[in-house]
Amino acid sequence: MTELDSIVHVPWDFAGKQLATEVRLGITYLTGDGVGQDYAEALKHFTPAAEQRNVYAETLLASMYENGNGVAQDYGEAERCYRLAAQLGYAEAQLGLGGMYLKGQAVPQDDAEALRWFQSAAEQGHDPSQAMLGAIYEHSERDYVQAHMWYSFAAARGNEPATKDRDLLAEKMTPDQIAESQQLAGEREPKSGSEN
């Protein structure tokens, strides 16, 4: 089973293989990998998979609508697609939905709700969400201990910007704050990696 197979989350019966094929074809057209980039073709392949509640297809559709890639930009549709996948526990969709709350796109701007969705994804070991939490705790909450902890989790997963942000933040912290952050991290280690 490939990494993409684990991301796509489908049963390996005929219908599952067909669904995975649709998602793979959509990704090929979305990225232009080996074919000309064609958002309309990507949309054509993601839609049936999303209708079957494939979280990966839902999230890719959400991103297309959020950014206006091959479709009219539609924050409402982006929010709907992100929410469907986020409620099923897909970390990438939780990050996207949290971003919509943070920016007030299709939903009222709500920092607490954004933080809740970022936290849910970060607890799954999703390093972009962990880095986002680090930034929020550093810049909005001014809680350097929490920020350092979340940056450290992301850095441990190879997130280079989070590593840089953690190291820059550490220069502003006392040794006691860094020790507290490390202690909290030891007590709260999220899942070791993310399949999401």
Image (tube, rainbow, N blue to C red):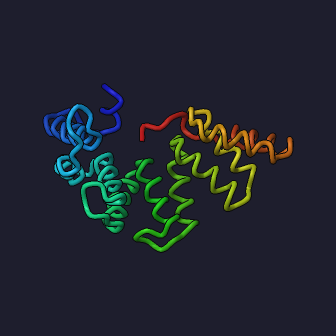
Horizontal side of 59 relative to 116 (left or right) equals left
Residue at the far left in the pictured view: 14
Q: Please state the total of marks drawn on the protein image.
A: 0
Give the quadrant of residue 157: top right
Placement of the C terminus among the 4 image quadrants: top left
Placement of the N terminus among the 4 image quadrants: top left
Give the quadrant of residue 28: top left
Residue at the far top in the pictured view: 1
Identify the residue at horizontal 26%, vertical 34% (top origin). Answer: 33
Up-down relation of residue 3 to residue 50 (above or below)? above
Q: Nearer the viewer, residue 188 or 107?
A: 107
Horizontal side of 112 relative to 165 (left or right) equals left
Identify the residue at horizontal 45%, vertical 63% (top origin). Answer: 100
Residue 26, horizontal then vertical, whole percent:
22, 43
Residue 62, horizontal then vertical, whole percent:
33, 56
Residue 11, horizontal then vertical, whole percent:
24, 36
Residue at the far front in the pictured view: 36
Up-down relation of residue 114 to residue 45 (above or below)? below
Q: Nearer the viewer, residue 102 or 193?
A: 102
Identify the residue at horizontal 17%, vertical 47% (top origin). Answer: 41
Identify the residue at horizontal 80%, vertical 43% (top origin). Answer: 171
Residue 194, horizontal then vertical, whole percent:
47, 38
